[in-house]
């Protein structure tokens, strides 16, 4: 029998079983260590963070600094900034990764699939023709072709070309 290894999955499994009273979307930006925390960009009201457990290379999350689960509870200024940052993120991914398509989604509530249900965040996942193969289906394993640190470097460099409005 062949064995397929995805050692990063154990970290995800163990983290998801521990009660976490601290919101990582609040604590990570406060640490001011963007490279370590995979934060590629900050705007006035939100930030862009690489997903530590990605569905695909370049899987980003666009997250408001305000700890809020409900999009309807964010003021217009935050919502506009959130969507501007989402748009910038799409431009950056297209520029450096050249995806054939994109998935953009928000999971609101645990029933909808939210892993962190108390802090709203958008997922932006680049997709390529043929990126779905037998690995996730048969082995429950996703093959990523680039280290998160390398992807962060590319993203951070490209985002630096965008001015931050009203920061």
Image (spheres, helix red, strand yellow):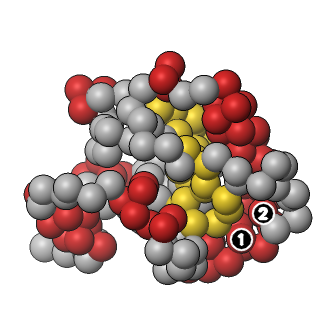
Q: Secondary structure at mark 2?
A: helix
Residue in the image at 30% along x and 73% along y: 8
What whole-number distance in Å separates the C-alpha atoms at marks 2 and 1?
A: 5 Å
Q: Quadrant of the C terminus?
A: bottom right
Q: Is residue 112 above or below residue 7?
A: above
Q: Is residue 70 above or below residue 127?
A: above
Would residue 105 be found to the left or right of residue 89 on screen? left
Give coordinates of residue 44: x percent, y percent. 70, 51
Give coordinates of residue 138: x percent, y percent. 25, 52
**In this rendering, does residue 25 appear at all?**
yes
- Numbered label attached to residue 97: none
**In this rendering, does residue 83 appear at all?**
no
Q: Which residue is mark 1?
A: 156
Give coordinates of residue 116: x percent, y percent. 31, 45
Q: Is residue 25 above or below residue 35?
A: above
Would residue 20 be found to the left or right of residue 123 on screen? left
Residue in the image at 72% along x and 60% along y: 97
Q: Which residue is mark 2?
A: 159
Name the foreground residue: 24 vs 10. 24
Give coordinates of residue 101: x percent, y percent. 67, 40
Would residue 59 be found to the left or right of residue 44 on screen? left
| Count of all numbered marks drawn on residues in the image | 2
Q: Which quadrant of the structure image shows residue 28?
A: bottom left
Residue in the image at 64% along x and 66% along y: 40
Q: Which quadrant of the structure image shows residue 26?
A: bottom left
Structural crowding at the residue carrying mark 2, measured as other residues with C-alpha within 10 Å and reported as few (<14), some (14–19) or many (≥20): many
Q: Secondary structure at mark 1?
A: helix
Residue in the image at 29% along x and 44% along y: 115
For this orientation, the residue located farthest to the top is: 72
Q: Is residue 71 above or below residue 126?
A: above
Q: Marks 1 and 2: in contact by CB < 8 Å?
A: yes
């Amino acid at each position: 029998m062949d064995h397929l290894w995805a050692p990063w999955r154990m970290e995800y499994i163990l983290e998801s079983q521990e009660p976490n009273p601290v919101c990582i979307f609040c604590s990570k930006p406060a640490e001011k260590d963007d490279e370590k925390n995979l934060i590629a960009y900050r705007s006035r009201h939100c930030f862009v963070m690489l997903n530590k457990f990605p569905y695909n290379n370049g899987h980003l999350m666009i997250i408001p600094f305000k700890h809020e689960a409900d999009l309807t509870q964010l003021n217009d200024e935050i919502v506009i900034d959130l969507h501007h940052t989402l748009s910038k993120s799409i431009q950056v991914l297209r520029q450096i990764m050249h995806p054939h398509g994109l998935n953009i989604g928000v999971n609101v509530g645990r029933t909808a699939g939210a892993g962190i249900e108390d802090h709203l965040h958008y997922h932006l996942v680049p997709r390529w023709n043929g990126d779905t193969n037998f690995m996730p289906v048969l082995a429950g394993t996703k093959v990523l072709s680039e280290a998160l640190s390398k992807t962060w470097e590319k993203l951070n460099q490209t985002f630096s070309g965008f001015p931050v409005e009203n920061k």
